[in-house]
Every structure is written in C-alpha cells, then in structure tokens.
Image (cartoon, coloured by chain):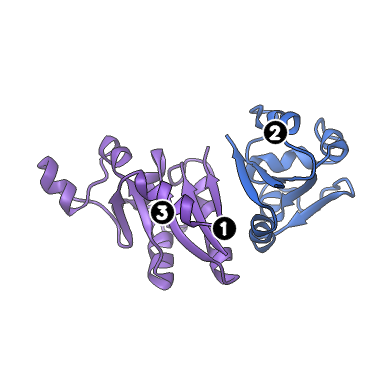
Amino acid sequence: MKIAVVVNEGPYQHQAADSAWHFVSAALARGHEINRVFFYHDGVNNGSRLTTPPQDDRHIQQRWSELARQHNLDLVLCVAACQRRGLVDADEKKRHGKDADNIADGFRISGLGQLIEASVEADRVVSFGD
Amino acid sequence: MATLNIVNKSPFEKHTLSQCLSRAAPGGAILLIEDAVCAVIKGGAYAEQLVTGQQKVYVLEPDLAARGFADAALPDSINRVDYNGFVDLVTQYDLVHSWF
C-alpha cells in the first residue's frame, strides 16, 4: 500500500518526530511504499544538518537521512515554513542572499503542492504532530 | 468508510480524546499513542468511556512501556499493538484521522 506521512512537529519537541520515524520504518519493513514524508510547520527543523544532540541521544535528523538513503525516500520540507525558521538549501541561499545553507542529506525544499500531490496519490495519509 | 482515529495527547492535558469519542463514527477504531496511552489504564477516568464506546480501541505498546505502564492492567477489550500493528491498522481502515 502507498502511504504518505506528514510531520508537523520539530525534533526533540515532544514525540511526534520519533513516532513518525518509527512508523515509517515499520511501514517500509512491512513492504509498504512511503511515497513522501512532508515536513510542515516546526516539522521542517527535522531537516537541519547542523543539529548536534548529545552522543548518547538519538540523532533524529541523521535517522531520517539514513532511512532516505536506504529506501530512496522523498523527504520534503515546506518552503514557507523553512523561510520562517531558517532552513536553507543551495537555491534558497542564493535566492535570499544568505551566507550559508543547512539542509541535511536526503531532504529537499519544495511547496505545499507536494503535500497535495502525495495525498492524492497515496492510499493513506498519516499525520504526526503536537 | 471506517476510520482509524489517532490520539496522541493525554486526556488530562488536552481535549482531543473527548472530542474524538464524541464525534467519531461507530465502527471505526481509536489508536492511542504517545501521552494518550495513559487514558487506557484500568480504573482511570477515561478507561470506562473507551470500552463502552462504539469503536475498537488500540494502544501503542512501546509508548505504554516508555511511561512505565508495560505491566499495567488494561480493560480486556483494549488491544496492545506495536509499530507493525500500527501500520496494519492504517492499512485495515479506509481513512486515518489524527486528532490535534
């Protein structure tokens, strides 16, 4: 089955980012297709490669990036949410004249249309948030 | 069209479980995850309401365990699921609705 996932909460905020990752991992292990994970609102903070949690803590961003690498996942950050929160890729850096970018491997920045498209194409949509 | 309702906040913190119980259509299911798992504890203020409702009730076992409720007594009709069970519920029901 094709499942789209929405993450509305940032990492280490409460539990939604962890729940979503565990759900996506289990769905993939059970042979389902995750056609997109869309990160919205504070959820875009999952995609910052500059996060440095303590060594004995789980690294939420790296877990997403690793899962994306293993399963060719499409991890999409909402562009408007990114602009508000300082999540920048190479294009956004250039477009807004910033001095750095900080998007992590496996993530890309795009628009809300990606959420609509994923929802239309998927058999189920599962949202995680606060 | 049967719906899987997902609730993730404690009913002692937010009203999403009450709202879900009063609005969810019969024949669906309620899955309690994260802090919402504390609603299922036998003798608690919400356990009775959950078992007398017209939805099947599931609770995410790892989230129960994370809160020290691994061995807690649950009403008989409430089913424990792991993340694989969570995925299966999502595929078994036609719609998935997260209550925020």
The reply to whether discs 1 and 3 touch (Cβ–Cβ < 8 Å) is no
Q: Colour of chain A?
A: purple
Residue B18 picture quarter = top right
Residue holding disc 1: A23
Residue holding disc 3: A54
Protein chain holding label 3: A
**Quadrant where the image shows the N terminus of chain A:** bottom right
Give the mark, 1 or 3, whose residue is nearer the N terminus.
1
Q: CA distance from mark 1 to mark 3?
A: 24 Å
The residue shown at (34%, 49%) is A77
**Residue A2 sits above or below residue B65 on the image:** below
Quick one: A98 or A1, which is closer to the camera? A1
Q: Decide: few, some or many residues near mark 3? Use Cα within 10 Å; few <14, some 14-19, many ≥20.
A: few
Q: Decide: few, some or many residues near mark 1? Use Cα within 10 Å; few <14, some 14-19, many ≥20.
A: many
Left or right: residue B100 versus residue B84 is left
Residue A106 picture quarter = bottom left
Q: Which mark is residue B20?
A: 2
Tell me the amino acid under the disc marked 2.
Cys
Quick one: B25 or A40, which is closer to the camera? B25
